[in-house]
Amino acid sequence: MGNVKLGATLFCYGTEYARYQYDFEECVKQAALAGATGYEIVGTQMIPSYPNVSDEFLGMVEDLKKKYGIGPVGYGANNDKGMRPDRNLTDDEMLADAIIDLKAANKLGCKVMRVQYMMSPEAFRRLAPYAELFDVRCGIEIHNPETPGSPTMQAYLKVIKETGSKYLGFVPDFGFLSVAPNKPHWMKALKAGVKEEHLEMAAQMRRDGVPQEEAAKELMEAGANPAIMATLAGMYGFVQFHDRKDLPALMQEFKDIIPYSFEMHGKFHYLSEDCVEPSIPYEDILPVLRDSGFDGYLICEYEDELYCGGYEYTRRQLAMEKRILGL
């Protein structure tokens, strides 16, 4: 048996934070009340002095740790190679930015840093000695539409194995295990006047591997409301889904990289009152994680496509995780 600990990313409360309904302290407080024992902080979102951590901010983090009993355990870095208007950042520049993020993660006391796959495998290789210096394990996020077995992720796995570094690994995002269309996208399409039959048609074409352009043409010929195109784009993009029959193969890919994983992102887009995520099969995923020997944080991560805030859904997600994991 492993040691799965439950946390939340403060990104869950991004809507409330952006609307000035929650300040940083309230985000931490709500994560603690929801049942998290640690939190992830996305540097670009909630650190006023980003990319550096000021002593003032660090002092507040420490004070809140004493007040609410939880502190930062994971740091979400944004590896943005499109920062310049004239060209992409080079590997040297991406590495330099990642080192600054490592320094921030270390100062906050985080032991894991999420790295995005805009950082090339070669730059990731070069990050290893700096990660060791700052004692922060760096995990490439495996985010939909990638899967652990995709060529992109296999290139990072090759680097991890070749370096033998205990500071390079993965942060799998459970969105890659989606087996049904994104619920909020579906709900918004219906509200915009799209017929359910056309949404079902779009989902089936995605399952059948019909190219996106061809699917769009067929939907228009079938008289679908043009508002369906946003939902269709999601089905072929960052919230795409797999046929349920493909889940065993995906779960095997997941099992294969658990030994190289430092943290898990428990992605969720919607939770019914009975705490069920309609597209991500947590009843299949969490028992595997529980029995894998994984020792680390499962960080729940709410994507608020409905712009309703993360207060209730984050509580439901943590309650669901506790129930399935037997915690």
Image (cartoon, grey):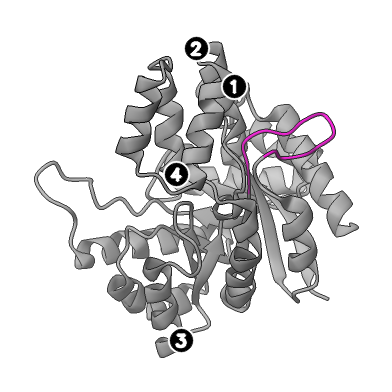
* In this view, the mark in front (4 or 3): 4
Identify which amino acid the numbered label 4 is placed on: Phe
Question: Who's the residue at 89% across and 57% down the image?
Answer: 327
Identify which amino acid the numbered label 1 is placed on: Met
Circles 4 and 3, Cβ within 8 Å, touching? The answer is no
Q: Which residues are magenta?
A: 267-278
Identify which amino acid the numbered label 3 is placed on: Lys
Question: Who's the residue at 57% across and 35% down the image?
Answer: 182
**Along the viewing direction, whichever of 42 and 188 lies nearer the viewer:** 188
**Would residue 158 be found to the left or right of residue 36 on screen?**
left
Point out residue 214 in the picture as x, y percentages from the top left corner: 32, 37
What separation in Å lies between label 4 and label 3 (alpha carbons)?
Answer: 27 Å
Identify which amino acid the numbered label 2 is placed on: Ala
* In this view, the mark in front (3 or 1): 1
| N-terminal-most mark, 2 or 4 | 2
Point out residue 80 in the picture as x, y percentages from the top left corner: 30, 50
Label annotation for residue 161: 3
* In this view, the mark in front (2 or 4): 2
Q: Is residue 117 visible?
A: yes
What separation in Å lies between label 3 and label 1 (alpha carbons)?
Answer: 43 Å
- Kindly give the residue lying farthest to the left in the view shown: 86
What separation in Å lies between label 1 and label 2 (alpha carbons)?
Answer: 9 Å
Q: Main secondary structure of the magenta part?
A: loop
What separation in Å lies between label 4 and label 1 (alpha carbons)?
Answer: 17 Å
Label annotation for residue 187: 1
Quarter of the image with the N terminus is bottom right
> Which residue does the numbered mark 2 point to in the structure image?
192
| N-terminal-most mark, 1 or 2 | 1
